[in-house]
Image (tube, rainbow, N blue to C red):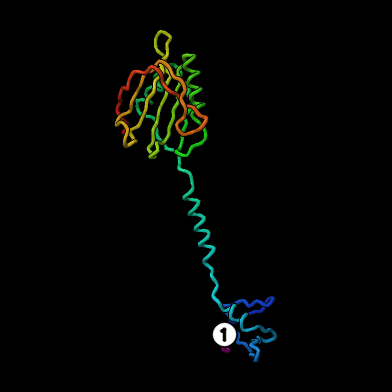
């Protein structure tokens, strides 16, 4: 049973609200169990309900849980792999002017076919025998980064070759050196992960011709 000197309450639509920084004793208690606070009154059940401690941490827990779930469900960022020294060298020597067909970068969860437009640009350059470069950067199933640089290289006599420089040195199961292949042409093959998407497939290649891995 509460006694005089209990925490102060204010009545609002038959609900009592606890004020922790003020004190006001009730003035009387009737035989029916009704407490009187000056001109206001309340039953014992209402008084006890208002005396229960309030849970103030639940919104924080909900917000924290939502933030954690959002972080766990976020997509894996795409790999960042720069061109190898050999690819940088070839980009300067493939021809008098080298068209940049772009670089397609894909995470493991990628669903957009960014690599096909790069391949289409490379095939046009190969058909017209104009020097060009493009790149495809992606992750293996284990999350290791792979970079493939494509080049259309002009040769003396007016011919062109399709050259690939593949860097799998970050793949624990891959080769320890960058590999270069000189090919006669290129075509399309189905993308291994993205539906309705194609990626370049070199044809008539000589190689691989190992080059030193980047530091």
Q: Quadrant of the N terminus?
A: bottom right
Residue 182 vertical placement versus 148 (above, below): above
Q: Position of residue 125 (x, y in %)?
A: 48, 18
Identify which residue, 115 or 195, lies in the foreground.
195
Apparent side of residue 55 relative to residue 34 in the rendered image (left or right): left
| Magenta residue check for 106 | no
Identify which residue, 63 or 215, lies in the foreground.
63
Residue at figure coordinates x 44%, y 28% from the top left:
135
Apparent side of residue 122 relative to residue 44 in the rendered image (left or right): left
Identify which residue, 177 or 84, lies in the foreground.
177
Residue at the outermost top position: 157
Residue for badge 1: 6
Determine crowd level at label 1: few under 14, some 14-19, many 20+ residues with C-alpha closer than 10 A: few
Q: Position of residue 50 (x, y in %)?
A: 59, 78
- Quarter of the rendering containing residue 9: bottom right
Residue at figure coordinates x 41%, y 8% from the top left:
157
| Magenta residue check for 5 | yes
Dot 1: what SS? loop
Q: Position of residue 152 (x, y in %)?
A: 43, 18
Q: Quadrant of the C terminus?
A: top left
- Quarter of the rendering containing residue 141: top left
Apparent side of residue 42 relative to residue 156 in the rendered image (left or right): right
Residue 104 vertical placement versus 38 (above, below): above
Residue at figure coordinates x 51%, y 32% from the top left:
195
Q: Which residues are magenta?
A: 2-6
* Number of disc labels: 1
Q: Position of residue 197 (x, y in %)?
A: 50, 29
What type of secondary structure mainly makes up the magenta span?
loop
């Amino acid at each position: 049973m509460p006694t005089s000197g209990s925490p102060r309450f204010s009545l609002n639509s038959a609900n009592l609200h606890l004020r922790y920084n003020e004190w006001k004793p009730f003035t009387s208690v009737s035989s029916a169990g009704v407490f009187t606070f000056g001109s206001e009154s309340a039953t014992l059940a209402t008084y006890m309900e208002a005396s229960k401690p309030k849970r103030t941490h639940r919104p924080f827990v909900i917000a924290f849980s939502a933030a954690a779930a959002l972080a766990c469900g976020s997509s894996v960022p795409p790999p960042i792999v720069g061109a190898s020294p050999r690819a940088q060298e070839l980009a300067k020597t493939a021809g008098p002017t080298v068209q940049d067909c772009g670089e397609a970068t894909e995470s493991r969860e990628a669903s957009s076919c960014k690599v096909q437009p790069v391949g289409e640009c490379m095939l046009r350059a190969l058909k017209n025998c104009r020097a060009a470069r493009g790149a495809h950067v992606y992750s293996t199933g284990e999350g290791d980064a792979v970079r493939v640089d494509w080049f259309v290289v002009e040769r003396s006599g007016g011919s062109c070759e399709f050259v690939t420089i593949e860097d799998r040195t970050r793949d624990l199961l891959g080769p320890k050196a960058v590999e270069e292949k000189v090919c006669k042409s290129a075509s399309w093959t189905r993308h291994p992960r993205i539906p309705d998407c194609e990626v370049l497939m070199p044809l008539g290649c000589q190689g691989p011709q190992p080059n030193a891995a980047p530091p």
